Image: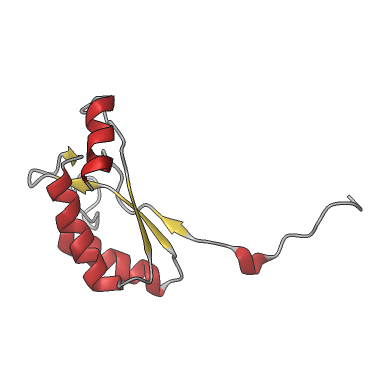
Amino acid sequence: MANETPHNNDELILIVAPNGAYKQADQHPALPLTPRTLASTARRCLDAGAAMLHLHVRRPDGAHSLESQDYRDAIAAVKKAVGDHMVIQITTEAARVYSPPAQMAVVREL
């Protein structure tokens, strides 16, 4: 269309979500589920051009977590790996485990 403004690819922002709330290591062995593996994945994603990480954290048994300490541990590891070069966005996904008050609480706590 003659009146459309062309898109500038220089404005592209790449956001990654490397694990989600449901998949487990037995479904995909490279799935980053621990703070250490999330940090190394974040570093590789940053090196590949990602600007933002959508972060899901897990309990030691691999279950989805919205616990603030699980987030603190993962965020600290990711920050150590990428510094301030990547935006970290936490998830508040209920994943059939958490209620809306718990989803809001983790944001307030962090």
Instruction: Choose top left, top right, bottom left or bottom right for residue 108.
Output: top left
Residue ID at (30%, 72%) = 82
How many numbered discs? 0
Q: How is the image coloured?
A: secondary structure
Farthest residue toward the left? 60
Residue ID at (24%, 54%) = 31
Frontmost residue, 18 versus 69: 69
Q: Is residue 40 above or below residue 75?
A: below
Residue ID at (8%, 43%) = 61
- The image shows residue 84 at horizontal and vertical percentages of 34, 70
Instruction: Choose top left, top right, bottom left or bottom right for residue 97.
Output: top left
Residue ID at (14%, 49%) = 70
Instruction: Choose top left, top right, bottom left or bottom right for residue 105.
Output: top left
Q: Is residue 18 above or below residue 8?
A: above
Q: Is residue 34 visible?
A: no
- The image shows residue 59 at horizontal and vertical percentages of 11, 44
- The image shows residue 99 at horizontal and vertical percentages of 24, 24
- The image shows residue 89 at horizontal and vertical percentages of 35, 52
Farthest residue toward the right? 2
Q: Is residue 76 visible?
A: yes
Q: Is residue 35 above or below residue 93?
A: below
